[in-house]
Image (tube, grey):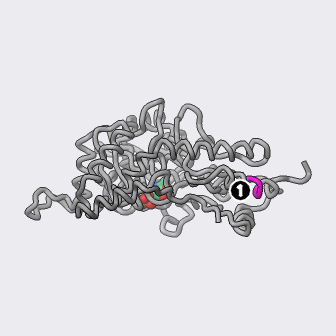
Amino acid sequence: MIPLAIPNIGKLEGEYLKACIDENFVSSVGRFVTRFEDEVASISGTEHAAATGSGTQALHLALRALNVGPGDLVILPSFTFIGSANAISHCGAIPWLMDIEPKSWTLDPKCVAHALAKKTERQNGELIHTPSGRKVKAIMPVYTVGNIADMDAIGDIASKYGLKIVADAAAAIGAFYHGSPIGTIADLTAYSFNGNKTITSGGGGAVVGPNSALVKRVKHLSSTARVSQEYDHDEVGFNYRMTNLEAAVGCAQLQRLKEFIEAKRRIRIRYNKLADKLAWVQPFPQPCGRDGVSWFSGFVIKDARLPKVSEICSRLKDQKIEARGFWKPVHMQLPYSETPREVLDVTEGLWSHIITLPCSTSLTDDDQQRVIDVLEPMLTIDAF
Ligand SMILES: Cc1ncc(COP(=O)(O)O)c(C=O)c1O
């Protein structure tokens, strides 16, 4: 089977894991955690990073550190992995779902500006969502498949309305925006390092940001808000730390980050060439001027003359190739059936037409060619 997106683990990961065991540092303190945090910060253009047990934990802590609390609203694109919405819910807050730009699949600033202008007003210094009476606290853009959102426009809106920005950069480690690393363009930025990401620590996440005090607060919250070795804790914290074992794997993976990003880019380019050939199939978007990374790759298949995504996936499976659809939007998920939302036309017209194709960094040219050779006849309209 040619898998969709699997980890690319080498010898170094084993050596670093053995070092943890030999040194008897297997838990949440250790030199690999410190090193992982330093390296993630440096890649992100920030002073500090706080490593966590998952991307969802990273987002949850980022929101908490920015004082998002029970009953608050956080603006979120509906087109995202459910973990983004869950992190908001874990704060007791509620996602306010908005649409995406077709050219990037990221939060559409025009929708955000329109919704805020129409549906909010200032009351006693707070921004209130007039239909529900709830406070609007933050915007959470998602860097979908590694595409950076239009952060200039989103930043302007956040400043105008006094909102914080937590960027969900789950799959965007190593990306740039206007030529600079992405860690300073939001108040806090969260990564995921789970197994299907460009680099993995087994499971894990991290928070970075331009304000070191805030990142340190995330670290504090992740470590049960402990203030001394004498079991003193100054608030209700979380046990959300990355372990030294996970960080050891993460450090080994980071040494190959550039290579992995380049491999993903090449994979995307090869699929795009097939999309160019088949005019009725669209490539994944890559907005110009935003120097993202190519996490997942695949096509948008909207032409009614072509088989449905589920049918293509099952035919590929018969040929021992793993392919899948992509995120079912948050507003279509049971736990979020009542959550406030704006018009979601782009999201609704897009999600079920996306097919994600094998794009592991270990995918060989021959294997990708096999995927393309098997796929091409399925995506060819005979009449042409
Ligand atoms: C956009 C997005 N947000 C959040 C997450 C959650 O990360 P994790 O699975 O590490 O909790 C993911 C992970 O797949 C993701 O793709």
Report whether residue 241 is seen.
no
Apparent side of residue 2 relative to residue 72 in the rendered image (left or right)? right
Bounds of the magenta segment: 370-375
Residue 180 position within the rendered picture, expressed as x and y whole percent measured from the top left: 43, 32
Apparent side of residue 381 relative to residue 231 in the rendered image (left or right)? right
Residue 126 position within the rendered picture, expressed as x and y whole percent measured from the top left: 32, 45
Residue 193 belongs to the span the image colors magenta: no
Q: Which residue is mark 1?
A: 371
Q: Residue furthest left?
A: 230
Residue 14 position within the rendered picture, expressed as x and y whole percent measured from the top left: 39, 60
| Towards the viewer: 11 or 279 | 11
Secondary structure mostly seen in magenta is: helix
| Towards the viewer: 210 or 11 | 11
Q: What residue lies at 89% left-to-right and 53% top-to-bottom? A: 382
Residue 373 belongs to the span the image colors magenta: yes
Q: Amino acid at mark 1?
A: Val
Apparent side of residue 231 relative to residue 60 in the rendered image (left or right)? left
Q: What residue lies at 25% left-to-right and 41% top-to-bottom? A: 212
Q: Is residue 218 above or below residue 108?
A: below
Q: What residue lies at 74% left-to-right and 45% top-to-bottom? A: 275
Assess disc 1: are there few (<14), some (14-19) or many (≥20) residues with their C-alpha within 10 Å of its C-alpha.
many
Picture quadrant where residue 29 is located: bottom left
| Towards the viewer: 60 or 260 | 260
Q: What residue lies at 65% left-to-right and 66% top-to-bottom? A: 1
Residue 121 position within the rendered picture, expressed as x and y whole percent measured from the top left: 40, 44
Apparent side of residue 338 relative to residue 241 in the rendered image (left or right)? right
Picture quadrant where residue 133 is located: bottom left
Disc 1 within 8 angstroms of ligand 1 (CB): no
Number of residue marks? 1
Report whether residue 65 is seen.
yes
